[in-house]
Image (tube, helix red, strand yellow):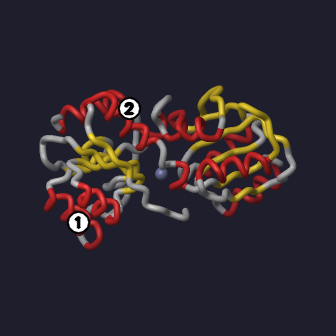
Amino acid sequence: MKLAELSDYIGRLLEVSRFRDYCPNGVQVEGRSQVLRVATGVTASRRLLEAATDWGADAIIVHHGYFWRNEDAAITGLKKRRLAHLLQHDISLLAYHLPLDAHPQLGNNAQLALRLGLLECGRFGEQEIAWHGELRQPQSVRQFSEHIERALQRTPLIIGDRERNLHKIAWCTGAAQSYFEQAIALGVDAFVTGEISEQNVHVAEESGVVFISAGHHATERYGVQALGEHLVQTFGIEHRYFEQDNPV
Ligand SMILES: [Zn+2]
């Protein structure tokens, strides 16, 4: 299919125009006009670009692309080498940030909920990006922690009472630790996100609400894969997800 058709389709699917974001969503670097092979990954690192190129990708779709607000606009150093790689190989880079967190079926929060057994009741936070709901089966923090470890292949960092029973949960993939107090105000038993900050530990202790840091990368690796598989089913393109392990 044509690159323009692909980006138009994803733009409508993820309702890109609905979001105020910190980076451009859609085609960030334009490559060849025909797309058959689509590689996906969480972050457009050099490692991902090289793996996708070796596989013969025409386009790469990521959650974390380039050109973030407040970053230096000059194309030098690491940024120059990443862009040069894409341009030399005529491979497109498409990035979807907040729209890919938010999509009700393919998004990172929806896909994390599927894996952790969470049922959505509503949204909260800036642009309603975070979710709250309940565990399909109430369980102790210890049991939920073991479930997360099996589901994400990563040991979560738990701040709080491990014997506490969990029912109501709020969650937001990635670096959403600043939503912790909004989650507490919703009356949840625990908040799950990717990253943690120093002050979250004190707030967890003083509120009694459990903070679960399950990994920025680990919580955000599923949306882009779901999008890739959706494109396979819709257009018959080839898709391969490239896991680039990241301990954060
Ligand atoms: Zn992220």
Percent of width and height locating residue 85: 20, 64
**Residue appearing at x 37%, y 58% in the figure:** 70
Residue 125's place in the image compared with 63, above or below, is above
The residue that mark 2 highlights is 14
Q: Is mark 2 within 8 Å of ligand 1?
A: no
Question: In percent of the image, x 62 and y 27: which residue is there?
Answer: 122
- Give the x, y percent position of residue 44: 34, 57
Image disc number at residue 215: none
Quick one: label 1, few (<14), some, or many (20+) residues within 10 Å?
A: few
Q: Is residue 123 left or right of residue 50?
A: right
Identify which amino acid the numbered label 2 is placed on: Leu
Vertical order, 239 against 120 (above or below) = below
**Percent x, y for residue 110?**
54, 35
Work out whether residue 12 or residue 156 is closer to the camera in this orientation and state it: 156
Measure the alpha-carbon separation of dots 1 and 2.
29 Å
Q: Residue furthest bottom?
A: 77
Q: Residue at x 37, y 43 (%)?
A: 96
User: Considering only order in the chain, which callout, 2 or 1, is on the residue closer to the N terminus?
Assistant: 2
Q: Which residue is mark 1?
A: 75
> Looking at the picture, which amino acid does disc 1 mark?
Ile
